Amino acid sequence: MSKPLTSQPRRTRGWTVLFAGAAAALALLLGGLPAHADDAASATETEAVSAPAAADLAGILAAFAAADFSTKDQLISQLATLHDPRARPILQALLDGHLETRSSDGKVFIVEEYGDALKLTDPLTSTAAGDGKPDDFERIRSNNALRKTLKVAIAQLELADTDPAVRIAAVKQMRRDIDDSTVASLRAAFGSEQNPKVKHEIAVALALADLAATDVDARLAAVNALDGEAATDVYNALMPLLGDADGKGIETDPKVRAAVIAAVHHINLWRGFYQVLDTLFFGLSLGSVLVLSSIGLAITFGVMGVINMAHGELMMLGAYTAYVVQQLMPNHIGLSIAVAIPAAFLVSGLAGVAIERSIVRFLYGRPLETLLATFGLSLILQQLVRSIFSPLNRSVTTPEWMSGLWQINDLFSLTYNRLYIVIFTLLVFGALLLVMNRTSLGLKVRAVAQNRSMAKAMGVRTERIDALTFGLGSGIAGIAGVALSQLTNVGPNLGQSYIIDSFMVVVFGGVGNLWGTLISGMSLGIINKLLEPYAGAVFAKILVLVFLILFIQRRPKGLFPQKGRAAEGH
Amino acid sequence: MRTSSPLMTLLFGDFGSRVFYALLLAMLIVVPLLNLGVTETSALHLSTYTVTLLGKYLTYALMAVAVDLIWGYCGILSLGHTAFFALGGYAMGMYLMRQIGTRGVYGDPLLPDFMVFLNWKELPWYWLGFNHAAFALLMVLLAPGALAFCFGWLAFRSRVTGVYLSIITQALTYALMLAFFRNEMGFGGNNGLTDFKEILGFDIHLASTRIGLFVASGIALGLGYTACRAIAVSRAGRVVQAIRDAESRTRFIGYRVENYKMWLFTFSAVLSGIAGALYVPQVGIINPGEFGPINSIEVVIWVAVGGRNTLYGPVLGAFVVNFAKTYLTAALPEVWLYALGALFVVVTLFLPQGIVGLVKQLLEKRR
């Protein structure tokens, strides 16, 4: 007696919107239809109770108000055979209990509750028809038998839809509770269906229904048909046939049982495959975060050899820039991200240039002192942010297109924000690679890193290049901060939590090697995620750290050490 | 100096050491007197809180001396030395936890409160023996020492030096911090070990016990300082300084650089462990936060502020910076991190030899 599936109302709303356009066009074509409908309603009112003869939508609708359950049943079947696009939302509303009659004039409306009032939609024109008080309306009731008829009717309508995606969704919906009536409509649809994908889904649904057949051959055929399917409902339908712990419910026929075992085995293989894929994807997205947070460091530490302990705080500055930009343009969340990226690059980059000019340049060749001075700077930056923005975390709103799931199939889905992080990381990496390898700045940066005095002799203004390189690395850190602001809370400690990881990634990859940083970040992310199911999140991280400590002992120059002349500089 | 005995040279060989010994001795005599000997109403009375604070500074100073020994004399910048400090502290904390006995909230004679809370039935094997003070003391020395030895054996043999070493020491203490945060480790997780009752049979809250701990810390600092000085002025100490200045050259002459580094690192870790063990009963708690990489870097700044490569400089630095911290975090909490941050920058840019170096410069100018 409870409400049907919770997902239904939401889908209905989508449909109402969709059909509104179609219905409006129809109304325009027919002209004056509403007025005519009203007339018809009053004219057929008396007949409708005994025999619903009215063949048009308005007549059927008007007849609902006074009809008993068996009459309603007939009315529903009539609605379904009308081939009228307006019928679908009406049936759905009736199923959800949202179809109500106004007591004053007997007019039928699709209602939606909001607050204390009802929002009315005229089912004939699919347009909004103002508000109403709940007391003035009476719900058109349905019972269990009626709901079944309704579901079948809706499914039939959907199976006849022109859009194959709708038909597939309808079949999948029907698979959830299969009974004789749905099977009948599915069989009918199977014969007329042209689209192979839809046809396949219907075949699966029919096979699922046949699992309960008394005939052994029918069951065997059904199981064989289901072999190779990986959907969750197929799995859930097959598993009971293997029997529970006490062997109850087990398939009696040995042949069918063997087929079920094979089918379940195949499903398990698929599930395992997608699980691995899932772990890999999670690992890649974690790895992307690591790469993003350490790629700026790969420039300042890797290329210049400067230990910048304030690197994390430059990321934090980028994240706060994203926050501020969003505060400035609260109505354009999606656009604010696009604005925040260059803004963060500028803010962090300028901060980086300032740091280089005021502190780091006095300490070249004294890495340990640089480390201490920049650490002091990181403390100052943290406290500065605390003073300006408060010590509490700030949250940056995620734009809508970044939230949600990309459901690839029943077993596998990707979350958009992780997917975008991976893509974004690769883009940033590609851009950085271009700058380093294809621009004059990149050439000079590499020249200064390889042989400072020779570069100077060739006319390169090394001091300026130092400042720009440091600014570039810092700016990239700012961009990473924007990305992080989408994943975690933006707070004064944001940078601190990444600094050790970032250094480990750069050292693991091999100092001065951008590709090494990419590979090491990604592989550390994947290793971490592979370990997590066995060790737990924190312990996996500890294991990775210990592994890195041991790895650096074995190969102090990282995975891809620099060779030749470039190596001598470090 | 050649006329006096080697011991006298060691102890009073340079001006800084003489001042250090004199001030330490004065402190160890005056502070207990002012606390126990003077009535509480008197203006000269030193509160037990202050005594404990000074005792804490003394343990910090010992830690700073240990860091100076490897950084100032051997050029090994460890950013993970609090790992050893905290390990020593945990060893002491485990002893103190076992001393609570049935006086805990749950009154379990064997299990500490947090284990009862986690529904543990048995004492983990690594907690066994910690009810004996002697065993705990051994662990205070062994746990940090063994870790440092293993770490040094691996790191120095594969010639990990400079910044790389600094970064992996930081990773080490970070990994330990994460590990100790886990409840499953059996060290009290997030809350750590606390609520201690007595040490060696003395009530830990009594003023006289606090004085005892203060004096013990002072003596530990004095002995640790002397030991470090003995190493520094010895033949091995000169090799160590040679390694700092020209590692490859020292190796080519025929010295086993990695052995010198490894043993020096281990000794320094043991000293840090002792400092940690004395620190815990005075502050009354040890938790994973003590492993924090930031703490390690703070120790380095004490050394830098005081003046590295002097041994007495770091003692001065530890007192000055921590006094400033205690004062500022209470009076102007907003300012403290600015001040600390600025201290890092100013000292590295303008005072490479720290306060001691500055004083020396001024004295030379006056001559």
Image (cartoon, rainbow, N blue to C red):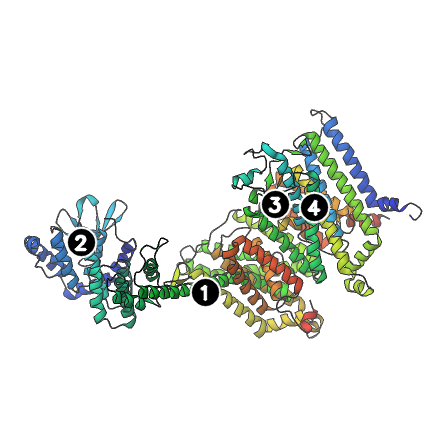
Q: Position of residue B40 (x, y in %)?
A: 69, 25
> Do marks 1 and 3 share a subunit?
no
Q: Nearer the viewer, mark 3 or mark 2?
A: 3
Label 1 vs label 3: CA separation? 40 Å
Question: Could you tell whether A12 is left or right of B244 in the image?
Answer: left
Report helix, strand or loop for mark 4.
helix
Please tell me which residue is depicted at 61% across the width and 67% down the height of the picture: A559
Please tell me which residue is depicted at 59% across the width and 48% down the height of the picture: B180
**Chain of the residue where label 1 is placed in the rendered structure:** A
Reading the image, the residue beneath label 2 is: A146
Please tell me which residue is depicted at 55% across the width and 68% down the height of the picture: A432
Instruction: Specify the amino acid type for callout 3.
Output: Trp
Report helix, strand or loop for mark 2.
helix
Instruction: Specify the amino acid type for callout 2.
Output: Leu
Q: Nearer the viewer, mark 1 or mark 3?
A: 3
Reading the image, the residue beneath label 1 is: A277
Label 1 packing within 10 angstroms: few (<14), some (14-19), many (20+): few
Label 4 packing within 10 angstroms: few (<14), some (14-19), many (20+): many
**Chain of the residue where label 4 is placed in the rendered structure:** B
Label 1 vs label 4: CA separation? 46 Å
Reading the image, the residue beneath label 3 is: B125
Label 3 vs label 4: CA separation? 22 Å
Which of A326/B126 is in front?
Answer: B126
Reading the image, the residue beneath label 4 is: B273
Question: Which quarter of the picture shows residue B204?
Answer: top right
> Do marks 2 and 1 share a subunit?
yes
Label 3 vs label 2: CA separation? 68 Å
